[in-house]
């Protein structure tokens, strides 16, 4: 098994908040976050002000990425178009998508409408897409991204991620090897089709094995992070290597996980802290994610949910509440990757094979 080692170029991610807010460093488990001029009614304010006050991270590429964004997994059809358009009108500037979600066309309609209406400039948006498992051959990476760009109605995306560390080809070894896929990823940067490249659902051991000698190192690793799965080992590793972590499922997925896992939004401790902070449980959880050193991309199908989620920026959890959420005893990985990242077909046959760590005892 590969070991985690130091890299001489590794650096802390620098986080900045625009519009007069201070520069700060986010570390794993602790943070100094500047007080924003936004108040509790900021979700009703002009989108330009919301966008300007959204904290940013400077990636190892030099790109500035908003730490708060909209996740589009599970939002389809016209609902996706309406949700993305409304989010942009409210002030969201980070839009997370993926080819595998099957909603590129609907996301693209919203982006085009917002740009055509002058609601936002392209350079102010940060759009993410992801390479699906059936397009890992080096020769297929660029065509896959070009097709996605056509559906998104964009000339480039800001970040293109390898969605999973596996392909659709069964067998005991990864086929094609990740090094081949990554050469295709580097080529789309050279072609100007994306400003940066990264990964999703990759363990520290796989990063070491596959990218130690990469010409372009991953700038982001998108993984599951929330108080019920703090994922601290991976967060510490990525911080050391200068890879920013985006947290998917920051509220878990209460609509899909009911009956299988405890619903994080209804956790007694989370609800109690929300009451004491005068915030909603979602706002508390998203603020915890920001303070914990990640960007957060909650889904927001309705305008009400989008506005509520916006209430996670512009304030700080108390140190006591942050520490409490950072030490919740229940820990379970809600998105295990079973059937997608690992299966009886290989090359990753078990949870341990995929994530390079034991499955939590609390997992079903």
Image (tube, rainbow, N blue to C red):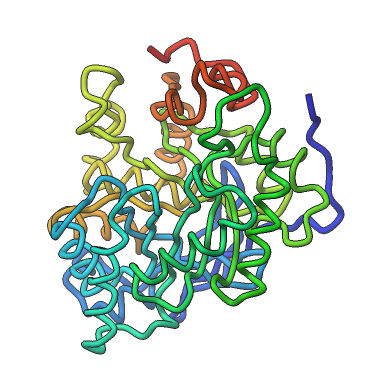
* Residue 363 image-quadrant placement: top left
* 284 left or right of 360 in image: left
Reply above or below: 339 against 114: above
Place of residue 9 in the rendered image (x, y in percent of width and height, measured from the top left): 82, 58
* 217 left or right of 308 in image: right
**Which of 36 and 244 lies nearest the eye of the viewer?**
244
Q: Residue at the far right: name it.
A: 8
Reply above or below: 188 against 240: below
Residue pictured at 32% horizontal, 45% vertical: 284
Residue pictured at 80% horizontal, 47% vertical: 212
**Which of 290 and 299 lies nearest the eye of the viewer?**
299
**Which of 107 and 282 lies nearest the eye of the viewer?**
107
**Which of 71 and 164 lies nearest the eye of the viewer?**
164
Residue pictured at 79% horizontal, 29% vertical: 2
Which quarter of the figure is the C terminus placed in?
Answer: top left
* Residue 148 image-quadrant placement: bottom left
Place of residue 60 in the rendered image (x, y in percent of width and height, measured from the top left): 67, 64
* 172 left or right of 126 in image: right
Which quarter of the figure is the N terminus placed in?
Answer: top right
Reply above or below: 274 against 262: below
* Residue 123 image-quadrant placement: bottom left
Q: How many marks?
A: 0
Residue pictured at 58% horizontal, 47% vertical: 136
Place of residue 118 in the rendered image (x, y in percent of width and height, measured from the top left): 26, 89
């Amino acid at each position: 098994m590969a070991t985690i080692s130091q890299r001489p170029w590794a650096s802390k991610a620098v986080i900045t908040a625009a519009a007069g807010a201070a520069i700060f460093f986010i570390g794993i488990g602790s943070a100094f976050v500047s007080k924003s001029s936004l108040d509790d009614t900021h979700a009703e304010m002009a989108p330009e002000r919301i966008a300007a006050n959204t904290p940013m991270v400077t990636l190892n590429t030099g790109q500035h990425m908003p730490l708060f964004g909209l996740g589009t997994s599970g939002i389809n059809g016209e609902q996706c178009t309406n949700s993305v358009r409304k989010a942009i009108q409210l002030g969201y500037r980070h839009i997370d998508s993926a080819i595998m979600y099957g909603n590129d066309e609907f996301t693209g309609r919203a982006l085009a409408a917002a740009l055509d209406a002058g609601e936002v400039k392209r350079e102010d948006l940060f759009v993410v897409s992801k390479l699906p498992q059936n397009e890992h051959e080096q020769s297929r990476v660029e065509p896959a991204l070009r097709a996605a760009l056509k559906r998104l109605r964009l000339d480039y995306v800001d970040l293109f991620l390898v969605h999973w560390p596996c392909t659709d080809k069964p067998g005991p070894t990864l086929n094609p090897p990740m090094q081949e896929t990554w050469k295709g990823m580097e080529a789309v940067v050279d072609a100007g089709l994306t400003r940066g490249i990264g990964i999703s659902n990759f363990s520290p051991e796989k990063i070491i094995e596959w990218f130690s000698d990469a010409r372009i190192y991953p700038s982001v690793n998108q993984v599951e992070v929330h108080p019920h799965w703090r994922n601290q080992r991976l967060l510490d590793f990525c911080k050391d290597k200068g890879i920013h972590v985006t947290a998917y499922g920051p509220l878990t997925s209460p609509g899909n996980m009911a009956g299988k896992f405890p619903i994080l939004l209804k956790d007694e401790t989370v609800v109690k802290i929300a009451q004491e902070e005068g915030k909603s449980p979602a706002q508390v959880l998203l603020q915890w994610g920001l303070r914990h050193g990640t960007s957060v991309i909650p889904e927001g199908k309705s305008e009400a949910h989008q506005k509520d989620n916006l209430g996670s920026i512009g304030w700080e959890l108390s140190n006591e509440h942050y520490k409490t959420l950072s030490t919740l005893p229940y820990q379970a990985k809600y998105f295990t990757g079973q059937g997608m990242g690992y299966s009886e077909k290989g090359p990753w046959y078990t949870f341990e094979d995929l994530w390079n760590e034991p499955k939590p005892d609390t997992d079903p």
